[in-house]
Amino acid sequence: MQSNAALEYDYTVAKLFTYTAIVFGFVGMLIGTLIAAQLAFPDLNYLLGEYGTFSRLRPLHTNVVVYGFTLSGIWATFYYSAQRMMKVSMAESKFLMALGKLHFLLYLVAAVGLVLSLGMGISTSKEYAQMEWPLDVLVVLIWVIWGMSIFGLIGIRREKALYITMWYFIACFLGVAMLYLFNNMEVPTYFVAGVGSIMHSVSMYAGTNDALVQWWWGHNAVAFVFTVPIVGMIYYFLPKESGQAVYSYKLSLLSFWGLMFVYLWAGSHHLLWSTVPDWMQSMGSIFSVILILPSWGSAINMLLTMKGEWNQLTENPLIKLMVLSSTFYMLSTLEGPIQAVKSVNAIAHFTDWIPGHVHDGVLGWVAFMIMAALMHMAPRMFKRELYSKKLIEAQFWIQTTAVVLYFTSMWIAGITQGMMWRAVDEYGNLMYSFIDTVTVLHPYYAIRALSGVLFLTGFVMFAYNMVMTMVASRAISEEPQSATPMA
Amino acid sequence: MFHWLEKRPFFFAVGVFLVIAFAGLVEILPNFAEAARPVKGLKPYSVLELAGKEVYKKDNCIACHSQLIRPFKAETDRYGQYSLSGEYAYDRPFLWGSKRTGPDLHRVGNYRTTDWHENHMWDPQSVVPGSIMPAYKHQFTNEADLATAYAEAVTVKTLFNTPYGDDVQPGQAAWDAYKPKVVAEAKKIAADMKNQDVKDMVAAGKVPEIVALIAYLNRLK
């Protein structure tokens, strides 16, 4: 291909990951809504026999939304945007094309394996790393293939300087690779003992060490799956959708390198008041507070990118989704450091305030950003305008209400429970038995279940909008410059 | 420097890796040098207890229960002595949990009995009115995977020098020879239970999950 000819980008792989993002998003959020309802109405635990209890479904929920929905979203946007940022088409290399398809295929196999094995209760019980060793091996393979895709595309790029979004994709790849390998060091017992299940393994680390490695991973899975690539996405899609240049290159530099350096230290804030050495706990606390700087740096950079163009907020619902998403990112990255202060953590830890915090991040920030990105991509990949603007507007308000209901109810629930656990009467005796602190939460659990239903409803609207865009929307002849066309 | 890096993906990637790996080097590695030593008198989990730990993992009790008592009076009053690092020396993986939808279990063996657990797993609301925990009746019929628990004991003995006896050896023959000891331990638990199906199963040399789980929970002290 002549370098001056218009490039025809190939979105085959991006489309495949878009489909799975929609499917896994729906499944993961459906399970999430069910388990939220189970806490309010325990009879719902018996819908699927032994496979339907809260405890069995909870890791299925987290894994399907993290590794199903979010990773699919990340890879859909990667295979879409990397070509465009580096001015190179997947179609130019048969090898990279095959690699991309293999990436998707193995990912599907791993996803099916994950759902089946967690459903059966085959689990290492390490949070967000529940997969047993055969699946871990597969994940490593998938990750290596993605790495080859990244650096393969980089190898044949025409645009020499890597755009900000590529920095974040590279960081996501490296960070997860390092952390995943270390955290999943485990020995399959069958090969040592010659008896028992071939699926079982035992961790290389014991007790406190295992906890440290696990939360070094657990925290940074949040960093390198829920933050880094999503920040990368907004750096690409907000300027593209709004037609505005990124406000400050220097601020993006500071935020990127700051985030890289600071994030990893903060993992031990999950282990405050535990048996890990005190100095590590303090480091976790301190770096969590410092983390506000690079997080807000990116968020403010994005908000300022809209400078002088705030009218777009009323005209374009995708801009609205992205700006709100950036705002929730600020809320979440302020809330996290507050919870990491040792005295606050003494009350907050083990309570519902923590899932509350997680969800204002993952619903308000991650899910909003991924949905906005996919809706930006759809008309460009399928050459049709978005099916319905009204539907996006309605979805926006339903889901925003859902997120607000989620975190406010969980704030109240968490602080209520944390205070009740430590309340003493005038003689210094504990005032409440544990079950008192459970039954009091019923209304908040019910509100959270409602919030789940609302968010899921919004997601179904999004899915419907996407499908109708693919099959029934009006065709567009040339690619839109900035604002996504929608009916 | 940054402009230079952005045009050189290899050095850029190396730079990112060094910056993110730095925290791990400083914060994570030093603790491994003085890996948690067991507290005095700590015994490794018996094979039956390990099988129970597998039930705990399979039904994912960690979703709602912690095993970490923090050093606050409100916690030591409620659950007992705060947790010590050396108590977890044989915990692979650690099962501290991150959420207390139900109470902490690190010392549940001190204040709950076999009988209590049996009633509780069958019908939680019968012993704790208002409880939102589901019943785990399938644990009364599913058979615990003793062979895999034994394999774990062999593995940690071989690789990490966990002090098991000389009778814990690799191979089917060694396991066949060892199994009666596990069943004998299960029989002691079953003797305190009232569910006839469970008693019958154990008498026939098969150990239901509930028996292994109770052995594990009773051990948490």
Image (cartoon, coloured by chain):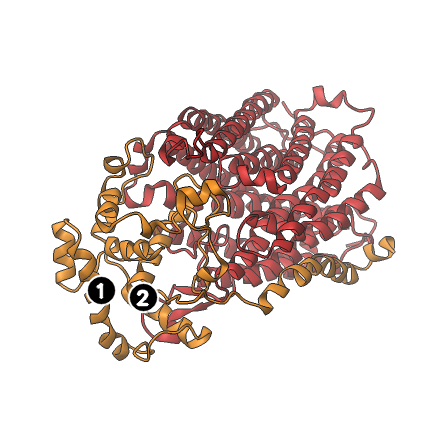
Q: Which residue is mark 1?
A: B185
Locate residue B202 relative to residue B89 in the image: left or right.
Answer: left
Regarding residue A60, the answer to whether it shows in the image is no
Q: Please give the chain letter of the residue carrying mark 2.
A: B
* Image quarter hosting the N terminus of chain A: bottom right
Q: Please give the chain letter of the residue carrying mark 1.
A: B
Q: Secondary structure at mark 2?
A: loop
Locate residue B163 relative to residue A288 in the image: left or right.
Answer: left
Share a chain, discs 1 and 2?
yes
Label 2 amino acid? Ser
- Mark 1 residue crowding within 10 angstroms, few (<14) / some (14–19) / many (20+): some
- Mark 2 residue crowding within 10 angstroms, few (<14) / some (14–19) / many (20+): some
Judge whether A386 appears above or below A390 on screen: below
Q: Secondary structure at mark 1?
A: helix
Q: Position of residue A198 (x, y in %)?
A: 37, 67
The answer to which quarter of the image holds residue A376 is: top right
Q: Are marks 1 and 2 in contact (CB under 8 Å)?
A: yes
Locate residue A327 relative to residue A87 in the image: left or right.
Answer: left
- Chain ID, red in image: A
Q: Looking at the image, which is closer to me, A386 or B136?
A: B136
Q: Position of residue B135 (x, y in %)?
A: 27, 41
Q: Which residue is mark 2?
A: B46
